Image: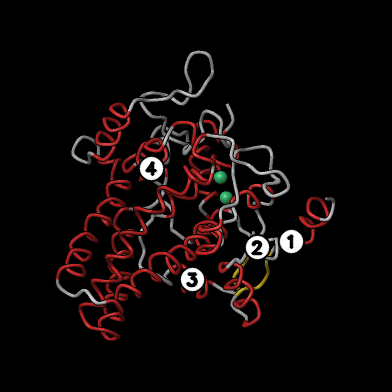
Amino acid sequence: MTFLNVVLDPPAYGWSDTNGNLSKPTPKQIFTEFFSRLNIFKNKKNWLPFYSWSKVLISVPFLMLFIFQYFSWSLLAVAFVYSMIIMGTHGTIWHHRYCTHNSYTFRNKFWRFFTQNLTISMIPEEIYVVSHHVHHEKSDMPGDPYNASGGFLYCFLADVNHQPIAKDLSEADYQRAVKLMVNTGITPNTYEQYQKWGSIANPYRTLLSWLLNWGFWAAVFFLIGGFGMVCAVFGAAGVWAVGVRTFNYEGHGKGKDMRRDNYDFSREDMSINQLWPGYVAGEWHNNHHLYPVSARTGFLPHQFDLAWCYIRLMYTLGPVKSFKDSKEEFLEHHYNKK
Ligand SMILES: [Zn+2]
Ligand SMILES: [Zn+2]
């Protein structure tokens, strides 16, 4: 079995049925799996998804305080821009294009650290990066961690049910998984530590970097706009972290073939280019499946790509040393051919 077949921890309902088709769990099966895999008292190897959802839960009181205590239209505008555009675009710049696809390089580690911490941290790199490689390898097939044919819940709760790494990897496979994470800059567990914690990320270092990141941004936003501003942006970060979990379902057509001719050119999978994720986060997802390592995915004139604007600006200013851009190739092979 190839490495990408075994790197993720399969759910209790399996990836495929006995005929090799996608195993489609019922909502009850999905929720049972979800709560079982969040239970750190049953198994401490569940700590990473538990940690990820804890961040969402902790953001809820901030959101409530913002709505019921500090609400103003200007803070709502800040919260909207922060969650939809800043957090969304940062996810594309950092988790997606850099950590996973290595589509550009930084001049040094400082700029990597700077970009990593450009926003309030919500999604652990490990949960995103390793499983996203599997997503590209097995798009819309059994084993795709957010296979849209599995339904909304299958994708929405994928970060717990389908994306964590397997807990029984051989040492050689564990080292392969560590290599997938090399761009993140995260110091990996040793194999012995992995056997104890079930993860590449170390829980103590992860907690420390979380506290430093949230502490820094809480101080910055407090100085800018007081506690009301802190509540607005931390609440917004939580809203984004929940909202982004809906992207994979919609970005692959909600389990239907929603690809349009002469617009969604990647035909190997069900991904589609959508205006909203495109405009707010640079996620032109069908283009991305066509050219996964391109630092730009907005190829057509109307496909504004804010993540690309950041990468290109950082290249002009110096922090980004190199990037891959597949726009010319796209135009030559797909668009100009029409
Ligand atoms: Zn995709
Ligand atoms: Zn990707």
Q: Identity of the amino acid at label 3?
A: Thr
Q: Secondary structure at mark 4?
A: helix
Mark 3 is surrounded, within 10 Å at the Cα level, by few (under 14), some (14 to 19) or many (20 or more) other residues, namely: some
Q: Which residue is mark 3?
A: 115
Q: Locate the N terminus and report the quarter of the image it occupies.
A: top right
Q: Identity of the amino acid at label 4?
A: Phe
Answer whether labels 2 and 4 touch (C-beta < 8 Å).
Answer: no
Q: Identity of the amino acid at label 1?
A: Lys
Of tags 1 and 3, the one toward the viewer is: 1
Report the disc number at residue 156: 4
Answer whether labels 4 and 3 touch (C-beta < 8 Å).
Answer: no
| x and y percentages locating residue 333 in the rendered image | 82, 51
Q: Which residue is mark 2?
A: 296
Query: Is tag 2's residue or tag 4's residue first in the polypeptide sequence?
Result: 4
Q: CA distance from mark 2 to mark 3?
A: 17 Å
Q: CA distance from mark 1 to mark 3?
A: 24 Å
Query: Is tag 2's residue or tag 1's residue first in the polypeptide sequence?
Result: 2
**208 displayed left or right of 268:** left
Q: Nearer the viewer, residue 106 or 33?
A: 33
| x and y percentages locating residue 157 in the rendered image | 36, 41
**42 displayed left or right of 329:** left
Report the disc number at residue 327: 1
